[in-house]
């Protein structure tokens, strides 16, 4: 015998006990046609097994079915009555205990039964309890079910939400194990997908209207457009009525398998608010010959059949007139005539083409039957022999539990029936959409969720879906997706789905919508104005095409021309006293060095290359060292000459042409050696500098060795200071043409320019650094050219009457003879 527990009445009438007398028996209300059909499917399947020649041949299965009132306490009482073999009209000695129990629809009820009967090894096979908590084999070792666990349904619902890009949803749960565990599993899944649950409302069929209204207000105040309802149909129905009453529309409902195909809410009135609902259910099947079995139900055929008289009242609207009905049945309506028949009725109860939970009941019966067959015949059905190896009276629930774990058969529809290690069947679902057709709510299959080798696949035919909000897929987001060029910024105290969109910082981009972080551009790129793409940075260097480059080039060329012109003048007028007094050879060397100094800035203009970088710094160092060497030679000659009190003084004679050339060459050679060492050890090279500007790359010449660079500058400075000191000592020598004064003045200009250059060079960014260096070169070169040679050119070209030896020597109190030193020049 197997037992069955079904919520034929879906509401328990609670009686408060004062503990002064024996508690009254629990009463139930709300006859449920859907649950009654489950009982009939169980009976139909048992009778089908009993007629089979291959499954339990010559063995008759018995059954006993009790009502649970959809209450855990009543369910537990029924389970104990079935497992202990008590109750009904039979005595305890005559009522055999059940070998297995098919129960129950609600997860809370199944939890109570499985936890209580587990220690006694009584197998419980549920047809509609989906709570993932029931998969715990430690707590529920004898629990099995023919409907997938909510663990898989939560994955399916999360995949559905992800597919339609709903990131901001609400949830309604029932205040029991089914609802709480289902919503908890769903929230865990959607958190992995960055989907937020705005609120979780709780309902139960026994809740007061005030608590129902609080949930309604929660829905109305929220901005969500998609709500998941993980609630059994009986618990959800009061809330559905209130939502329809308040005309709350525009919500896309997602349903659990507990109510999406239930008959009671599937009405045109409910469709006003719940049309377009989506939900997962197990596969449907059409059981052959079931419809004729259902239409043959009659209280007159078997007056003692459980719940048939209540069914008759509900369907026919009249009470069957049966004498001695007993079992507490009390007619509530007018008596029937006795001529009523079910064959002419066309109600949902008799529609056997949409069987889902009923199909689970059908499979549960067959699973128990196959387990019993393995025990009795010691082999799986169908078998070649009908020889029993064990008596029926020797069967224990423990043996049934052990064989249920081994059950693996293919039913008449080709579906594989087996249980995994946790007592669960293979998970697979149909996706159902509520659609109105011919004035009736149809449960249209629009997709599937299938598990295969641990991989879950969701397939949806979107063109078949009819949305309550129109043809477009509803949108439900707390914050709109951030456009390109912006990133998400979490709002403090809000879920991760609620955020502000902040433009990307300079140098970072977001080229996709909904980016959490902006991506930095590569070093040589920068973000565009829209912050959606990286563009190459502007390459900057001092070029010949820009105004600054043109101006500096023009000044450099002008200095070159002036140097050459001055040299020509000195060559043409080399026999005049002014030129002779100026030491024409050193003057020409100096003018040639200035010519090179004016050409030197041209190497600083243009795109830096390896050769150009090596040339510009070494050319600068050598030419200015050459220039300073020439000035140093002139200074020594002037000082020596004017210090000679008498003609042919030995101090003056020591500095002839040879000595002058040695000074120039040796001083220049030192700089050449420094530059050679520089180029050998760590030469200058072109470098890309990013520190000056975020949007520009400055191409400049890296000095390579800083020590070598400062050695070159230091050596030039040393020569300049030496010239300045020597010229300063001879600044007050009496003559009309004191060369030392011009040299002193030129060195002061030179030093002032280069001292000023240092802070300007350090603080100038990018190409302006090069411009400052060029300016210093030109300014110091022009200072030398003008200070030393302008007075001489003035006398030669404009005041030729002063270009006489008498004029040059006029103010001298001493007779100073330059001839032995300067010669003819």
Image (cartoon, rainbow, N blue to C red):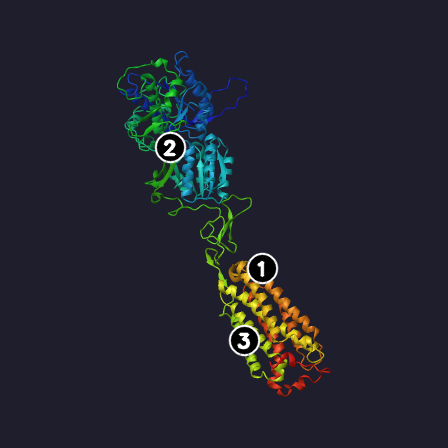
The residue pinned by badge 1 equals 706
Question: Tag on residue 734?
Answer: none
Give me the C-alpha separation between circle 3 and circle 2. Answer: 92 Å
Q: Earlier in the sequence, mark 1 or mark 2?
A: 2
Quadrant in which residue 332 is drawn: top left
Q: Secondary structure at mark 2?
A: loop
What residue did someone put label 2 on? Answer: 427
Q: Residue furthest top?
A: 93
Q: Secondary structure at mark 1?
A: helix
Q: Is residue 693 above or below residue 1?
A: below
- Dot 1 alpha-carbon crowd within 10 angstroms: few under 14, some 14 to 19, many 20 or more: few
What's the distance in space between the residues labelled 1 and 2, CA to CA?
74 Å
Q: Is residue 470 above or below residue 741?
A: above
**First along the sequence among labels 3 and 2:** 2
> Toward which corner of the image does residue 124 lie, by quadrant?
top left
Say above or below: 285 vs 768.
above
Q: Between residues 84 and 624, which one lies in front from this camera angle? A: 624
């Amino acid at each position: 015998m197997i037992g069955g527990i079904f919520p034929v009445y879906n509401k328990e009438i609670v009686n408060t006990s004062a503990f002064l007398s024996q508690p009254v028996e629990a009463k139930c209300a709300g006859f449920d046609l859907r649950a009654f059909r489950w009982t009939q499917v169980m009976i139909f399947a048992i009778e089908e097994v009993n007629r089979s020649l291959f499954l339990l041949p010559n063995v008759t299965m018995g059954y006993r079915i009790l009502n649970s009132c959809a209450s855990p306490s009543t369910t537990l009482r029924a389970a104990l009555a079935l497992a202990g073999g008590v109750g009904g009209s039979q005595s305890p000695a005559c009522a055999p205990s059940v070998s297995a129990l098919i129960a129950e629809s609600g997860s809370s009820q199944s939890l109570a039964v499985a936890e209580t009967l587990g220690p006694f090894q009584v197998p419980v096979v549920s047809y509609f309890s989906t709570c993932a908590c029931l998969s715990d084999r430690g707590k529920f070792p004898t629990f099995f079910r023919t409907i997938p666990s909510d663990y898989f349904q939560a994955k399916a619902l999360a995949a559905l939400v992800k597919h339609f890009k709903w990131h901001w949803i609400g949830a309604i749960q029932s205040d029991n194990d089914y609802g709480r565990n289902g919503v908890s599993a769903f929230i865990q899944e959607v958190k992995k997908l960055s989907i937020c649950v705005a609120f979780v409302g709780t309902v139960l069929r026994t809740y007061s209207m005030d608590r129902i209204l609080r949930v309604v207000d929660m829905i109305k105040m929220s901005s969500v457009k998609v709500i998941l309802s993980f609630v059994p149909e009986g618990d959800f129905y009061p809330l559905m009525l209130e939502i329809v009453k308040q005309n709350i529309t525009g919500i896309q409902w997602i349903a659990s398998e507990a109510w999406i195909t239930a008959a009671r809410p599937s009405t045109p009135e409910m469709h006003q608010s719940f049309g377009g609902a989506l939900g997962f259910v197990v596969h449907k099947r059409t059981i052959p010959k079931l419809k004729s079995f259902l239409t043959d139900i009659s209280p007159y055929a078997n007056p003692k059949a459980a719940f048939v008289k209540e069914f008759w009242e509900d369907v026919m609207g009249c009470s069957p007139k049966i004498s001695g009905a007993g079992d507490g049945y009390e007619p509530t309506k007018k008596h029937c005539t006795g001529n009523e028949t079910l064959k002419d009725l066309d109600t949902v109860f008799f529609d056997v083409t949409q069987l889902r939970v009923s199909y689970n009941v059908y499979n549960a019966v067959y699973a128990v039957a196959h387990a019993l067959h393995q025990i009795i015949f010691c082999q799986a059905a169908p078998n070649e022999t009908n020889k029993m190896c064990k008596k029926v009276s020797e069967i224990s629930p423990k043996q049934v539990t052990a064989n249920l774990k081994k059950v693996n058969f293919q039913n008449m529809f080709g579906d594989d029936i087996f249980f995994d290690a946790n007592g669960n069947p293979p998970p697979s679902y149909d996706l159902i959409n509520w659609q109105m057709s011919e004035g009736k709510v149809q449960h249209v299959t629009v997709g599937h969720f299938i598990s295969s080798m641990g991989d879950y696949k969701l397939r949806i035919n979107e063109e078949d879906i009819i949305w309550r909000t129109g043809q477009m897929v509803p949108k439900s987001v707390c914050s709109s997706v951030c456009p390109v060029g912006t990133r998400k910024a979490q709002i403090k105290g809000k879920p991760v789905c609620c955020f502000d969109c902040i433009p990307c910082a300079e140098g970072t981009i977001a080229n996709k919508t909904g980016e959490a972080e902006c991506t930095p551009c590569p070093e040589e790129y920068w973000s565009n104005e829209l912050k959606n793409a990286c563009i190459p940075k502007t390459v900057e260097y001092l070029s010949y095409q820009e105004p600054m480059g043109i101006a500096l080039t023009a000044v450099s060329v002008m200095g070159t021309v002036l140097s050459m012109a001055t040299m020509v003048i000195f060559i043409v007028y080399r026999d005049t006293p002014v030129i002779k007094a100026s030491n024409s050879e050193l003057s020409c060397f100096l003018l040639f060095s200035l010519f090179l100094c004016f050409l030197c800035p041209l190497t600083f203009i243009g795109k830096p290359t390896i050769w150009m970088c090596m040339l510009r710094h070494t050319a600068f160092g050598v030419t200015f060292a050459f220039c300073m060497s020439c000035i140093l030679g002139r200074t020594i000659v002037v000082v020596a000459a004017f210090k000679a009190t008498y003609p042919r003084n030995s101090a003056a004679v020591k500095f002839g042409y040879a000595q002058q050339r040695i000074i120039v060459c040796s001083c220049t050679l030192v700089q050449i050696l420094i530059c050679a060492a520089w180029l050998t050890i760590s030469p200058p090279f072109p470098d890309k500098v990013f520190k000056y500007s975020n949007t520009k790359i400055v191409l400049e010449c890296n000095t390579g060795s800083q020590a070598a660079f400062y050695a070159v500058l230091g050596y030039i400075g040393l020569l300049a200071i030496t010239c300045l000191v020597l010229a300063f000592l001879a600044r007050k020598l009496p003559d009309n043409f004191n060369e030392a004064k011009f040299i002193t003045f030129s060195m002061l200009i030179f030093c002032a320019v280069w001292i000023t250059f240092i802070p300007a060079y350090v603080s100038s960014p990018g190409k302006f650094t090069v411009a400052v260096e060029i300016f210093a070169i030109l300014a110091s070169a022009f200072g030398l050219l003008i200070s030393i040679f302008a007075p001489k050119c003035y006398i030669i070209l404009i005041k030729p009457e002063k270009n006489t030896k008498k004029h040059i020597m006029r103010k001298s109190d001493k007779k100073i003879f330059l001839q032995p030193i300067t010669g003819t020049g």
